[in-house]
Image (tube, rainbow, N blue to C red):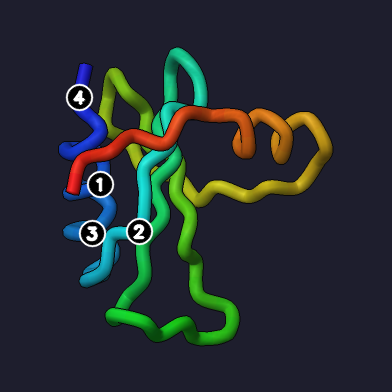
Amino acid sequence: MITAKEAMNKVLKSQGYKWPIRVKDYDDQHYVCEALPEVGKLAVGIQTTFGVDKNTGEITAFMMNDHDNLDRYINAETIEMY
């Protein structure tokens, strides 16, 4: 099992992003990491939210696309690590 900090570092490295925003403990199997490519800059259409499997470290795009998904994301604990 990977830590929240390891999950964020994987996202930053794999995407070439520079600015970590937050990690949420989404469920028993996933963290949700938010990051930006550059400090304070958000380009239209850029992916900023990623799911990371706690066991494998596999990274996927995370979309908040339905009511259950959004509620779970909002209620997930934000992990303080920076």
Q: Secondary structure at mark 1?
A: helix
How far separated are the C-alphas under marks 3 and 4? 15 Å
Q: In the image, 76: left or right of 41?
A: right
Numbered disc in front, either 2 or 4: 2
Residue found at x 36% / y 82%: 40
Lower sequence index among marks 2 and 4: 4
Give the class, few, some or many, for how many residues have Cα within 10 Å of label 3's Cα (few <14, many ≥20). some
Give the class, few, some or many, for how many residues have Cα within 10 Å of label 1's Cα (few <14, many ≥20). many
How far separated are the C-alphas under marks 3 and 2? 11 Å
Q: Secondary structure at mark 3?
A: helix
How far separated are the C-alphas under marks 2 and 1? 9 Å
Please, is residue 73 above or below residue 13 in the view?
A: above
- Which residue position holds label 3? 12
- Which residue position holds label 1? 8
Give the label on residue 2, or none. Answer: 4
Marks 1 and 3 in Cβ contact (< 8 Å):
yes
Residue found at x 29% / y 18%: 55
- Which residue position holds label 2? 21
Residue type of the residue flagged with mark 1: Met
Q: Secondary structure at mark 2?
A: strand
How far separated are the C-alphas under marks 2 and 4? 18 Å
Lower sequence index among marks 3 and 4: 4
Quadrant of the rendered image containing residue 67: top right
